[in-house]
Structures are given as structure tokens and as C-alpha cells.
Image (cartoon, rainbow, N blue to C red):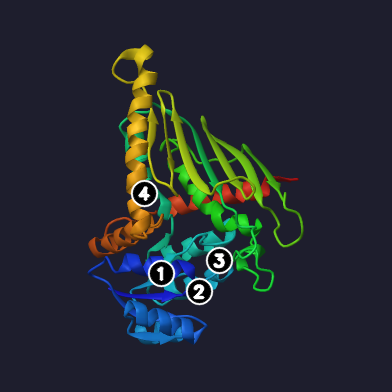
């Protein structure tokens, strides 16, 4: 399959690292408004050609799959053009700034018969997959609460979001910079809602704050709750607590499991052999050993420069495998639909501080 990328920003490298794992794919073209960036990326990853005009790239290179990695406000036009040109599209999150725009993209995908996949990469990280397996095997009982908490000190001087002289495009999203990350929080929360539960979002509370003040950041803190059926989803994003973390906690009727995607481990508290009296001690011992082993593994990964993007590499491979074999995409249109509607509900239901 002939692959191409449009946009060579920070995330491009991770898409192309994932693409190198796919034997059936060949990078035929790299497109960026900056010819220097396009050339640098093409040289590094062995692309056949570079472009600064994506329409020309679609006409000449005729890629089978296009990775659209440009800022979200550009996605509607670029993704639609790629689908109309006959290419499948793997688009960075959020696929669209609003649900209304996402509906147009999904309609274009159905009309052209081409696949459309939004990057839900953290769903495919090892520890998240482990927690999903625990849920599927009933180890935690019935899921009643999912909390996703992301802490990023992105307001600090020197950060790409804090730079007033080179304004980051995410500042112009409906929820500002938090909108850049909220898709991750939403799809991780939703993936643990029981599958037979309708994804209705009529019970949503969202407190949006700008604790740091000023007009550069619209918001820098989100504290939200959504109740879907009988499952409570808690979504937190903060720039004012520390250290940086990305914690997922899934609580069921029997126990709970937790991971931090930035320092991966899985802590599981559940009924153990020994009964109700000894279970707390067994849980402490088992999780103590888990944390010791995780610290050694995470130290090794830091030395080897392995990052939290392992899930993206896995997702890229699964997307190409699904295209090759004619199987459903690992991230479905329904997944994208419910995620975008939840984000819209959080933004629409906002109370500001």
C-alpha cells in the first residue's frame, strides 16, 4: 500500500515510526507547507517524493492511505479531498473541532467507501489493554466509574503552548488548548462503559477554569462528570498540579485497576485468595511487586527512549492490517461519533470560573 503524510509536526514522527513496522506499506510522499520540513522528514523516513501542495500530491503520488496530521481546523477540507481522491484517511485527533464537522467527514467516508480512522492511540497502550482484559474477564465486576486524569505543566515558559510569538493553533479550538487533549480523555472514559449502554450525554457537568489568568489560555483546568447509564465518567485536566501524569482508573463492583500512561504500571485491587480479611494484605504485596518491576522496566524504556506513543505504533499497524485483510477498523466510526459527541457535550455544558 502506498502511504503519504500531510503535515510534519511533532506527531508525524510517531506515525512514521509506526509505519516502519508495516511491511506492506511504502511511504511514497510527504507534504508540508514548509519544503524544508517536508525534505527533512522524507530523508529521515525514506519517502519517494515531497510536496508543498497536497492536491498535487494526491494527483501525482495517488496514495492508498493518507495520514492527515495538520491542525484540526484544516481537517474538514483536507480529509474530504483525500477521501474524494480515493484514499483511506488516518487523521490525528480531534478529527474535527465540532461534532457537526465530524458528521460531514463520516458522511464523506461512507459516500466514498474509504476508511476514516481517528487517532485513539492510548486505547492500544499495553497497560490500557491489560485493564480492558481484566474488565472483559469480569475481574473487576460491573464497571461503575471511570476516571481519566491528565496533568500537564504546559503553561510554563518555553513550552510550545505558552509561546505568545508563535501562537499554537489549538488556542483557537472551542475549548482552547485543553481541546487538544480532551479527545484522549473522552475515548478512554467511554471504552469502559458497558457495550449495551446507549451513549447518551444528557447528564454532563463541566467546570472550565483559567486559574493562570490572562488571555493567552482560554482555559487551563477542566473538572467534569458525565453519567452514561449507570456509569460515572470523571474527566480531569489540570495545568496547576504536579507532576505530569495521565492516570486511568476503572472501578467496578468487585475491585479497581489503575495505570499511569506516562509511567506505566497496572495496580489491581480485587478479592484475592485468603478471603475478605487477607485480601487487603495480598493486594498490597502483589501491587508492591508490580511497582518494583514497573520501575525497572520504565527505567529501561527511558534509556531506550521508548515513549507513551507505543499505542500509536500499534494502532498504525492494526489499521494497515485491517485494510489489507478487509476487516473492520480498530477505531470505528461509532467510536469516533460517541467521543466527539461527549466532547461537544462537555464544551456545551460548561460552567466557567
Relative image position of residue 19 (x, y in whole percent): 32, 68
Does residue 310 show up?
no
Which numbered disc flags the more N-terminal residue, 2 or 3? 3
Check the image and report above or below for 70 versus 268. Answer: below
Residue placed under numbered mark 4 in the picture? 298
| Helix, strand or loop under label 1 | helix
Q: Position of residue 46 (x, y in %)?
A: 31, 80
Q: Give neighbour class at mark 2: few <14, some 14-19, many 20+ (Cα, 10 Å).
A: some
The residue that appears at 71% across and 57% down in the rendered structure is 218
Marker disc for residue 78? 2
Among numbered discs 3 and 4, the one appearing first in the sequence:
3
Apparent side of residue 224 relative to residue 265 in the rendered image (left or right): right
Q: Is residue 71 above or below residue 227?
A: below
Q: Position of residue 299 (x, y in %)?
A: 36, 50
User: Gap in Å between the C-alphas at discs 2 and 4?
Assistant: 38 Å
**Kind of element beneath mark 3:** helix
Q: Using the numbered discs, state the Cα–Cα distance from disc 2 to disc 3 in whole angstroms.
A: 10 Å
Q: Residue 99 lies in what quarter of the image?
A: bottom right
Label 3 sits on residue:
72
The local secondary structure at tag 4 comes to helix
- Tell us which disc is closer to us: 2 or 4: 4
**Discs 4/1, front:** 4
CB-based contact (under 8 Å), mark 2 and mark 1: no
Q: Residue at x 71, y 48 (%)?
A: 209
Mark with earlier residue (4, 1): 1
Q: Mark 3: give few (<14), some (14-19) or many (20+) Cα within 10 Å.
A: many
Q: Are marks 3 and 4 in contact (CB under 8 Å)?
A: no
Give the Cα distance between marks 2 and 1: 20 Å
Picture disc at residue 242: none
First in sequence: mark 1 vs mark 3: 1
Work out how far the residue at label 4 is from the one at label 1, CA to CA, in angstroms. Answer: 22 Å
Amino acid at each position: 500500500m502506498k502511504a503519504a503524510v500531510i503535515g510534519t509536526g511533532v506527531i508525524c514522527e510517531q506515525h512514521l515510526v509506526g509505519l516502519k513496522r508495516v511491511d506492506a506499506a511504502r511511504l511514497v510522499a510527504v507534504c508540508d507547507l514548509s519544503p524544508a520540513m517536508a525534505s527533512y522528514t522524507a530523508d529521515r523516513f525514506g519517502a519517494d517524493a515531497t510536496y508543498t501542495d497536497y492536491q498535487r500530491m494526491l494527483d501525482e503520488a495517488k496514495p492508498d492511505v493518507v495520514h492527515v496530521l495538520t491542525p484540526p481546523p484544516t481537517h474538514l477540507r483536507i480529509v474530504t479531498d483525500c477521501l474524494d481522491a480515493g484514499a483511506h484517511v488516518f487523521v490525528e485527533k480531534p478529527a474535527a473541532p465540532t461534532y457537526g464537522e465530524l458528521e460531514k467527514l463520516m458522511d464523506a467516508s461512507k459516500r466514498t467507501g474509504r476508511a476514516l480512522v481517528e487517532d485513539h492511540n492510548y486505547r492500544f497502550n499495553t497497560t490500557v489493554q491489560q485493564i480492558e482484559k481484566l474488565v472483559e474477564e469480569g475481574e473487576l465486576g460491573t464497571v461503575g466509574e471511570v476516571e481519566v486524569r491528565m496533568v500537564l505543566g504546559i503553561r510554563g515558559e518555553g513550552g510550545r503552548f505558552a509561546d505568545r510569538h508563535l501562537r499554537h493553533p489549538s488556542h483557537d479550538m472551542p475549548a482552547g488548548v485543553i481541546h487538544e487533549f480532551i479527545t484522549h480523555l473522552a475515548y478512554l472514559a467511554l471504552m469502559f462503559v458497558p457495550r449495551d449502554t446507549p451513549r447518551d450525554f444528557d447528564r454532563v457537568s463541566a467546570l472550565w477554569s483559567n486559574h493562570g489568568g490572562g488571555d493567552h489560555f482560554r482555559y487551563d483546568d477542566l473538572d467534569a462528570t458525565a453519567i452514561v447509564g449507570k456509569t460515572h465518567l470523571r474527566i480531569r485536566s489540570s495545568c496547576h498540579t504536579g507532576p505530569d501524569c495521565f492516570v486511568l482508573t476503572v472501578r467496578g463492583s468487585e475491585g479497581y485497576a489503575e495505570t499511569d500512561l506516562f509511567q506505566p504500571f497496572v495496580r489491581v485491587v480485587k478479592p484475592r485468595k485468603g478471603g475478605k480479611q487477607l485480601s487487603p494484605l495480598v493486594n498490597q504485596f502483589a501491587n508492591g511487586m508490580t511497582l518494583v518491576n514497573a520501575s525497572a522496566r520504565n527505567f529501561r524504556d527511558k534509556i531506550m527512549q521508548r515513549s507513551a506513543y507505543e499505542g500509536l505504533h500499534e494502532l498504525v499497524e492494526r489499521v494497515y492490517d485491517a485494510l489489507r485483510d478487509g476487516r473492520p477498523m480498530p477505531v470505528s466510526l461509532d467510536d469516533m461519533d460517541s467521543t466527539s459527541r461527549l466532547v461537544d457535550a462537555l464544551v456545551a455544558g460548561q460552567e466557567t470560573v
